[in-house]
Every structure is written in C-alpha cells, then in structure tokens.
Image: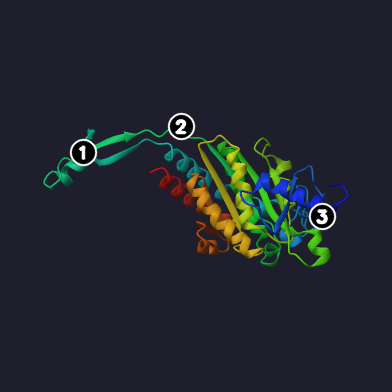
Amino acid sequence: MGGDPGLQRAVDKAIVQNKYFDAPSSTVTGLHIYEWPKHDRRCEAWSSMRQPGELTIRRHDTGGRGQSLWDILVTPEEVLQPALFEMKRVFADNQRTRDQRNLKKGRLDGRALGKRAWQREPERLYKKHERPKKRDYAVIVAGDCSWSQHLGKTMVVTKQAMFAQSELLHRMGIPFEVWANTAAYTEEYKRTREVEGYDMIMNQIKSWSDPWNEKQQEGLSWLHAVETNLDGHNLEFLRKRLMQSAATDKILLYYTDGEMPAANYGDELDVLKRELETYKRMNITLLGVGIGTDSPREYGLDTVRVDNKGDIIKVVKHLGGVLMNMHR
C-alpha cells in the first residue's frame, strides 16, 4: 500500500469519512482541523496576509490616528447589557415551572372557572404543574469564512456578531465553542482538473475547555475570508461536536452570509436536508443567523437576520422563542 499513492488516498478518505460523516461522500475527500493559537499563521484563514477591509486585526492594532481598532469589533455595553438581560430571561423562562391547562383532573384552575362554568365541558376546569427537569446548555457559535464573505463585505459583521454572542455566553457561564468553517479544492483536483473534490476546513477558535480571553478573541478578530464552503457537511461536523456534550440542551448558532449551499451543490443540499431532520429528531436547536439576509429559510433553516453589531438582541429573542416552543 505504501507504494500506491492512489490507494493510500483512498484509505485516508475512508478513515476521515467513517469518523466524521454519517454517509460516504464522493466529493468531500478530506478534513483539516486547525486550532487557535496553535496554527496561528499556519493555515490560510489565519495567514499573515492582512485584510484591512475585513477588520483582520490583532489586539494591539491601531488606526491612522492611533485609536484602537478593537472598538470597531466589540459591541458596546449599551447594546450588550440589554441583550444580556434578555438572555438571562430566556434561559430562566426555559427552566420555569409551567401550567398545563384544560384538563379533566388535577388542581382546580381558577382562570378557567369564568370561561367554562356554563359551557358543555365544565369538567375541563383543572390544571397541573409541569416541573421541567434541570437543564444545562452547550452552545456552538460557528461562522462562515468563505470567499463570498469577502466579496459581500459581510466578514466584519459576522465577526462582530459572533464576538457579541460569545461574550454573552461567557458572562452567562454557559459552555461554548467557536468555529469558523470553510473548504478548499483538493490538491488532486487543482492538479488534474478532472474529478471535482473538496477538503473541509474547520478552524477552532475556542474549544469547550478554552477560556474566552484576549487570546481566543484575537483568533476571531484575525480571521479572514478564504476559498469556499460546504454547508451540509459543516452542520454534520458541528452536530457531532455538540453530541460530545452531556448537556440537556444543545444549541448551534450558524452564522452565514446566505450563499448556501454554494459549492458542491448537489451533495451539500442532500446532506443539509438530512441534517435539518437529524437536528429535529435529536432535539438539538439549530438557528441560522443570516448576515444581511434570511435566505437560508428557503431550505428550511430557521434564520434570523442581522445587519450590524447592534442586532445581537434579535438573535437572543429569536432563540428564546425557539427554546420555548421546543419544551412546550
């Protein structure tokens, strides 16, 4: 086997697909996982090439007048504080005791007496308390860093929104990971231009155990747009990351500019549809966050639109509605 490069590539492909994919793919042949800060400047998304238009900055970078560029990335407290208050309410409501009404037995429901006393079903005057099981949370914040983000000038808003959401989760004490997803043509396809093939590229900015500190924040700020994206397989990979957590409530917030699935269309669309059903079946919350768009809704991905870093509260409120509906 060592003397047959083609056979070795086939074996490597089978190993990757067996570990990370639920079904074989003829087009997605490899997977590269890069970790921050281990791979700083050692992969394309964190290369030394600066992209000023995408606010690719280090913590100490300043503008022409000497002011910190960091303030452009960070959401101000007057926006974060109301969003944090709303987020606390959302997660508290999701754990609150609820009343199940319109029952034939249980505790007498005073609210129903006036409405039903003279109706044909006066026996439906009872209620019972539902005490939800103790809930804990695991969240993944994942964003597109494909080339369409550069062309659409949405990379800055993506990083601002992901930064704000991560800060809220940090302040809430909720375990979370941060990822940036992209993909590249395989070296074989670049060389031969015969059989189209892709390698997934997943850039881990923060793991479950990493702190959300200045170093991890810099991993998000230094990110810039590269190559293409594989949305269906991204969702599959990120679902498997969530499944590693023992939390009762698992949540993926998927930040996208709406160009999905752009590359590898047929294969990615099939996997995307399958994953949407899998998330529902496994009761994993999947919420798209569209940068300047809500177009992923056409594929069945529940999506809230954000246009600037002041829109973080829209994401929190929408997430609250999703969680409430799941546990009714």
The front one of 67 and 258 is: 258
Q: Residue at x 77, y 43 (%)?
A: 37
* Residue 313, visible in the rendered structure: no
Per the model, the C-alpha gap separating discs 3 and 2 is 52 Å
Q: Are marks 1 and 3 in contact (CB under 8 Å)?
A: no
The front one of 256 and 271 is: 271
Which residue type does callout 1 highlight?
Answer: Lys
66 relative to 149, above or below: above
Q: Circle 1 sits on which residue? A: 104
Q: Circle 2 sits on which residue? A: 134
User: SS for tag 2?
Assistant: loop
Which residue type does callout 3 highlight?
Answer: Gly
Q: Circle 3 sits on which residue? A: 6
x and y, in percent, of residue 327 in the image? 41, 42
Dot placed on the residue nearer the N-terminal end, 1 or 3: 3
28 relative to 176, above or below: below
Per the model, the C-alpha gap separating discs 1 and 2 is 28 Å
x and y, in percent, of residue 248 in the image? 50, 36
State which mark lies toward you, 1 or 3: 3
4 relative to 247, above or below: below
Quarter of the figure with residue 92: top left
Q: Are marks 3 and 2 in contact (CB under 8 Å)?
A: no
User: SS for tag 3?
Assistant: helix
User: SS for tag 1?
Assistant: loop
Dot placed on the residue nearer the N-terminal end, 3 or 2: 3
Q: Residues within 10 Å of mark 2 (few under 14, many from 20)?
A: few
Q: Residue at x 14, y 42 (%)?
A: 122
Dot placed on the residue nearer the N-terminal end, 1 or 2: 1
* Residue 83, visible in the rendered structure: yes
Which residue type does callout 2 highlight?
Answer: Lys
x and y, in percent, of residue 304 in the image? 51, 57
